[in-house]
Image: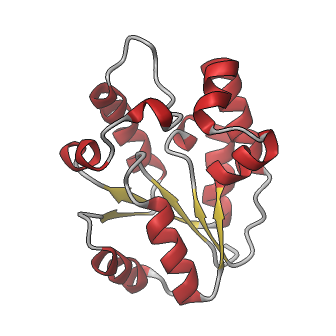
Amino acid sequence: MNNSISLIGMAGAGKSSIGKELAKRLNFHFVDSDSIIEKKYGKSLQDILSQNGNKKFKEIEEGALLSVEFKQIVLATGGSAVFCDGAMEHIKENSMVIYLEVPYEDISARISDFSERGLLKRSDQTIQEAYKEREGLYQKYANYIVQNKGEIDSCLNKILRLIKF
């Protein structure tokens, strides 16, 4: 492991907010895989998803994740990163993976409109069904599971106690 941390979890779990602050405290670089994709394509995630479809979006996301160099970074992954097996293996080999677990009720309260989030799901699937589908994958790939109930400092302190760099 190259002393890096990757945060996984549902859209609205706090990966970017927690990741930025965690990187600051550890003096690491912060990397947001969603931002990598948006910069490369010059479009929002939702536009990329709408124009390319789920399959191509997964390929784009996997490529972005595989391009990450793990050298003292905190990586905030996209919520659908767990659908990219090769990328998740790359992430697990090169970083400590922390699942920011947030109850569905809190996610739905934090994000009132998922239509602009670039949320990868089947057209016949509700947000709650997508949440349930991903939950097991987040648990599968996580080295640690940390509850994030909204208090950034509380969540950060839990993560900092786990880190032994």
How many labels were placed on the picture? 0
- Please, is residue 120 above or below residue 18 in the view? above
The quarter in which the N terminus is drawn is: bottom right
Residue 24 in percent (x, y) is at: 56, 84
In the picture provided, is 137 more to the left or to the right than 55?
Answer: left
Q: Which residue shows up at 67% across the image and 45% down it? A: 87
The correct choice, above or below, for 25 with respect to 149 in the image is below
Residue under the point 62% across and 67% down? 95
Q: Position of residue 130 (x, y in %)?
A: 37, 29
Relative to 62, say whether 35 is above or below.
below
Q: How is the image coloured?
A: secondary structure
For residue 75, what is the image quadrant?
bottom right
Q: Of 128 and 6, which appears nearest the observer?
A: 128
User: Which is more toward the observer, 121 or 1?
Assistant: 121
Task: Determine the residue located farthest toward the left in the rendered image.
Answer: 105
Residue 84 seen = no
Instruction: Spot the residue most to the top.
Output: 124
Q: Nearer the viewer, residue 85 or 105?
A: 105
The image position of residue 58, as x and y in percent, is 65, 30
**From what the image shows, is residue 5 above or below residue 117?**
below
Residue 118: image x %, image y %?
53, 34
The quarter of the image holding the C terminus is: bottom right
Residue that appears at 29% across and 50% down: 110
Report whether residue 19 is seen: yes
Relative to residue 134, is residue 20 drawn left or right? right
